């Protein structure tokens, strides 16, 4: 694993890593629009070598949801 | 290594307007979601020192934008417009249902689609001087006909091929229209990488985010030559770059070139370089070696593809590579920013990168099998038009070496000039000359009084305008044809003419050609009863060679202008012959 989940989120949305937590969502991260949301999907897939389903992608409401789906794909997450 | 789309997006946020006046206005039209391309192009152009201004039309708005003469697209007045069309959306339902159609129905669908495209191109041309790059259509890898798709009378694949052929014909015949082979792009990276069903269903994204930076690279292939950022010369190391091993250590027979797998890789690389040379890219050598050891390989090795005559400058010595680079640049009269440097040695790469950041130093891997594909992946050698002068450039540099030899053997300049037997043919602009005239205004930096840059459309307008005279000069001598190497544009006012543009390609500077052209302009003005010629010298960082030309030629400074009173005698150089064509 080259980057942690929070590093990727922070980079894609251009927000400080300290501001990323389970509750981070399009509601509180301004640059989290549908376009950047899909860029994030792409980054996560490349980084963790997985493929999300369309349902998983459309289901994501916040970072906690992302973690849940990553676990379903057997991605071991460090304590971010 | 290509950056990821997310990196381009975050980088693009921090780009501020540069001080440079080199600006590019890009319009992007597409019939599917293409987010991220604009941001990537912004980063890539700013890396080249260009100010990027863009207009991205709304989703699938290309028809309205092109058909409405008052559209935001035309208001923006782009330099270059990319029209990017996916096969899927262009054919809509027919993308699937064409397989239930009769051949006749398919033929009439093809006619209708072609008419639509031709109409768009025609209207576009009427409304803007922008170049138009239109993508051809991707032929899907899949067909429900399976293995008999190619046996079908007029299959869907064949139909797309037909459209692509027609588009190619259009782009061949219309100067400002370029066809980008998108189908080739998809085969280069694979439809399964470029297209992803999830991204398609989620947001009609038909070029995946991973592929956007790669696609942007392809479009940069157009932007670079449009802004004069294309490369003209490849400077090569020898040991482990053109052949394997070190000739000084392994001797003539010990180097790898030819029959071994590695040896074949070097041969292949040389063949690709030779192909570029045939297209007008200049090759040069910058190598630390004993001259005699290395030149023997070039002259005598049976598997050597590149010959001495393919190199415009040969620097094989023990000098500093950066110093050699400067010598090559001077000898070829080519700016360092037009050069690419290939050297396997990381230390040499660093040396050149530090000393001359404007040179494109290629990071070469250890494996020679990759050299060819690295060269082929570069988008730096494109030109928008290839003139005869471009194609023959390699040969011209060989002739230039012979001229140098003569110059060194003759003791004074006058004798040298006389022995060159120079002939200057002055020609009025015509449709065949326009591309070259525009090209010279775009790239001539040194002997250029005003450095005004004109696209072909501009030159065409001047040429059709009675108030302007656009001319150029072909220069020949006993060693060969230098091609069209001088340009002038005169704006005619009642009794006074204005020298809008006067330039001379640097490779023929200092042979009296400039004086001969000017004197013909002066004579022609005098015959037309003109009182005076006004001119202007606009200094730039590079045009010092033209600084004193006006005063040396008898122009007097009045306020902001240089003026030549035509009641003076007109001097012309006597060591060369002048012919005036198509008067």
Image: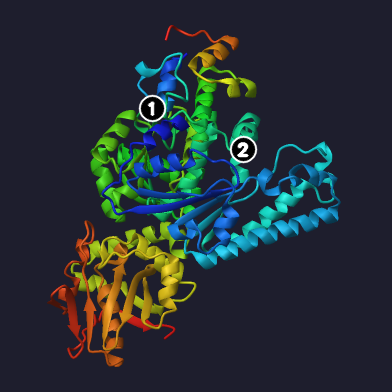
Residue B293 appears in the rendering: yes
The answer to whether residue B302 is above or below residue B173 is above
To which residue does mark 1 refer? A14
Viewer-proximal residue among A1 and B276: A1
- For the C terminus of chain B, the image quarter is bottom left
Q: Chain of mark 2?
A: B
Q: Position of residue B18 (x, y in %)?
A: 28, 46
Q: Chain of mark 1?
A: A
Q: Residue at x 35, y 77 (%)?
A: B423
Quickly name the residue at label 2: B204
Q: What kind of element bears circle 2?
A: loop
Q: Position of residue B100 (x, y in %)?
A: 85, 45
Quadrant of the frame with the N terminus of chain B: top left
Could you tell me how many numbered marks the image carries? Answer: 2
Residue B482 in sight: no
Could you say where residue B371 lies in the image, as x and y percent from the top left?
Answer: 47, 35
Q: Is residue B387 above or below residue B357?
A: below
Please say if B304 is above or below B546.
above
Rate crowding at label 2 as few (under 14), some (14 to 19) or many (20 or more) other CA atoms within 10 Å: some
Q: Under tag 1, what secondary structure?
A: loop
Q: Is residue B277 left or right of residue B314?
A: right
């Amino acid at each position: 694993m080259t980057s942690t989940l929070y590093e990727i989120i922070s980079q894609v949305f251009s927000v400080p890593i300290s501001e990323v937590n389970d509750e981070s969502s399009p509601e509180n991260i301004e640059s989290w629009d549908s376009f950047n949301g899909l860029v994030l999907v792409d980054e996560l897939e490349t980084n963790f070598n997985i493929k999300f389903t369309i349902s998983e992608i459309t289901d994501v409401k916040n970072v906690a949801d992302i973690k849940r789906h990553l676990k379903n794909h057997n991605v071991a997450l460090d304590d971010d | 290594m290509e950056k990821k789309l997310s990196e381009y997006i975050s980088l693009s946020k921090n780009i501020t307007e540069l001080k440079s006046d080199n600006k590019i206005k890009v319009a992007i039209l597409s019939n599917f979601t293409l987010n991220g391309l604009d941001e990537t192009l912004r980063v890539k152009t700013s890396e080249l020192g260009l100010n990027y201004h863009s207009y991205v039309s709304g989703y699938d708005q290309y028809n309205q934008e092109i058909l409405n003469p008052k559209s935001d697209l035309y208001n923006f007045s782009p330099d270059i417009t990319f029209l990017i069309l996916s096969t899927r959306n262009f054919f809509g339902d027919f993308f699937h249902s064409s397989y239930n159609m009769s051949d006749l129905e398919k033929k009439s669908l093809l006619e209708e689609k072609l008419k639509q495209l031709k109409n768009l191109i025609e209207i576009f041309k009427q409304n803007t001087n922008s170049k138009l790059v239109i993508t051809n259509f991707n032929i899907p890898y899949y067909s429900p006909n399976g293995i008999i798709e190619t046996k079908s009378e007029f299959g869907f694949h064949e139909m797309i091929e037909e459209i692509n052929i027609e588009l190619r014909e259009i782009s061949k015949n219309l100067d400002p229209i370029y066809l980008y082979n998108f189908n080739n792009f998809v085969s280069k990276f694979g439809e399964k990488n470029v297209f992803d069903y999830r991204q398609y269903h989620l947001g009609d994204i038909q070029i995946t985010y991973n592929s956007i930076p790669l696609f942007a690279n392809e479009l940069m292939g157009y932007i670079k030559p449009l802004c004069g950022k294309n490369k003209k010369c490849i400077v090569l190391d020898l040991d482990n770059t053109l052949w394997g091993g070190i000739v000084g250590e392994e001797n003539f027979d010990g180097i790898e070139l030819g029959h071994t797998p590695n040896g074949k890789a070097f041969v292949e690389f040389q063949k690709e370089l030779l192909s570029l040379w045939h297209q007008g890219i200049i090759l040069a050598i910058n190598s630390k070696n004993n001259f005699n050891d290395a030149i023997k390989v070039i002259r005598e090795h049976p598997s050597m593809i590149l010959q001495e005559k393919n190199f415009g400058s040969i620097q094989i010595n023990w000098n500093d590579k950066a110093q050699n680079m400067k010598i090559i640049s001077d000898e070829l009269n080519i700016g360092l920013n037009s050069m690419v440097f290939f050297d396997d040695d990381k230390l040499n790469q660093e040396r050149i990168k530090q000393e001359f950041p404007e040179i494109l130093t290629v990071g070469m891997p250890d494996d020679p099998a990759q050299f060819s594909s690295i060269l082929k992946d570069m988008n730096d050698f494109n030109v928008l038009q290839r003139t005869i002068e471009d194609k023959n450039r390699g040969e011209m540099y060989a002739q230039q070496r012979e001229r140098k030899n003569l110059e060194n053997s003759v003791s004074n300049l006058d004798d040298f000039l006389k022995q060159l037997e120079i002939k200057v043919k002055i020609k009025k602009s015509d449709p065949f000359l326009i591309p070259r005239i525009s090209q010279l205004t775009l790239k001539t930096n040194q002997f250029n009084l005003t450095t005004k840059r004109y696209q072909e459309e501009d030159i065409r307008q001047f040429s059709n305008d009675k108030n302007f005279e656009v001319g150029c000069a072909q220069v020949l001598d006993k060693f060969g044809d230098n091609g069209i190497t001088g340009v002038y544009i005169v704006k005619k006012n009642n009794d006074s003419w204005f020298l809008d543009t006067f330039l001379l390609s640097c490779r023929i500077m200092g042979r009296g050609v400039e004086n001969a052209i000017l004197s013909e302009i002066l004579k022609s003005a005098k015959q037309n009863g003109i009182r005076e010629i006004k001119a202007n010298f606009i200094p730039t960082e590079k045009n010092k060679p033209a600084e004193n030309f006006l005063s040396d030629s008898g122009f007097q400074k009045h306020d902001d202008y240089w003026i030549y009173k035509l009641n003076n005698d007109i001097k012309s150089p006597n060591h060369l012959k002048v012919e005036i064509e198509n008067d």
